[in-house]
Amino acid sequence: MADDLQLSSDSSTPSGDAPQRFSFHGTGSEYFRIWIVNLLLSIVTLGIYSAWAKVRRTRYFYGSTSVAGASFEYHGNPIAILKGRIVAFVLIVIYNLAFEMSDLLALLMIAAVMAVAPWLIWKSLQFKLYNSSYRGIRFGFRGRLADVYRVYLLWPLLSMFTFMLTAPIAHQRMKQFQHDESRFGSTHFSFHATVGRFYMAYLTVFAIWLAGIVAISIFFGGGMFALFADARSGGAPNPAAMSAFFTFLLVLYAWMFVLFPIFATLLQNLIWNNTRLGEHRFTCDMKWPRMVFITVTNIIAIICTLGLFTPFARIRTLKYRLESMTLLPSGSLDEFVADAQAQASATGEGMADLLDFDLSL
């Protein structure tokens, strides 16, 4: 398995239990070359090359990410990814045709998609983790199929029927299932964030959203009320009121974009501060003002460059998110990795024949 890992050139794995910060050494200019070639070849091949593009892109991201002196590696097979994308394309075509033909067929198709979706997610999780490695040791994902349907079908349905009031529970169950069933070699991850913590994150974002709506209404809502007053009186709309109204809508729309990085920051901190690998812990200290700044400036730059800044924006975001994470070893990482290597060798390759399909979610 010598080719399963590319060690970073700066150092070997440190010993002891000193905190190990994640680092990302990818650059926007490097990724731009990968991105533009992937984009052009995907267009020329009518999307067929997109599977190879994903492998190339993911290998670059993995190889640019390191912790404790070693980087990660991705071993995904483009053919498996292409199979998944063909399946997804066929499902979309059948789904749309069913809606065109009859309401009954449409309902049957919705039921069929809901029935098969958890299985597809399960296969994708297995594929992604098994084809990821660190220091020559593969990650893995098990999980019983019955649990997959409970987590990815029953809980989302319950959230819909309760008008999203149980969405934090569904979210917590999904992350708990994903992390508890994931492993590095033979050592399992574990997840310890409670449902209450997820509700707190959701309520925090809701409170921030509501405060923003109130502030925007106070400072920019005058035009909206003036426009409504003109409409009720039957008079022609005032140009100043129209301008103020569209400014109000623009600011409101921009506020929605600001909420996404805030929510992402709260969730990443919550999830990784409550994740362990055996006795080893992780921490994450992302700051939402920084994340908002990166997101907003990325959007502005992408618009101003007609999309050409997209790869640079991806690198900026990924670098901040990864370098906000730290591994807190419980003892020597050298001993842990050596032990994981020995235990994984007996069972690690047994999954290979089951992982020939990836929906590429």
Image: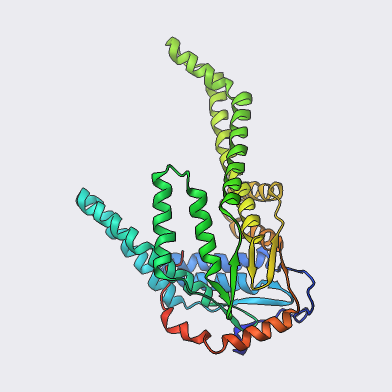
Report the front residue among 321 and 55.
Answer: 321
To which quarter of the image does residue 12 belong? bottom right
Q: Is residue 144 above or below residue 321?
A: below
Nearest the eye: 106 or 186: 186
Residue 355 quadrant: bottom left
- The quadrant the N terminus occupies is bottom right
Residue at (41% x, 74% y) in the render: 357
Q: Nearer the viewer, residue 309 or 263?
A: 263
**Front position in the image: 353 or 170:** 170
Residue 269 appears in the picture as rendered: yes
Pinpoint residue 223: horizontal percent, then vertical percent. Answer: 56, 21
Picture layout, residue 25 above or below residue 112 = below
Residue 304 shows up from this direction: no
Q: How many marks?
A: 0
Q: Where is residue 332 shown, x and y percent of the image?
A: 75, 79
Image position of 136 (left or right of 361)? right
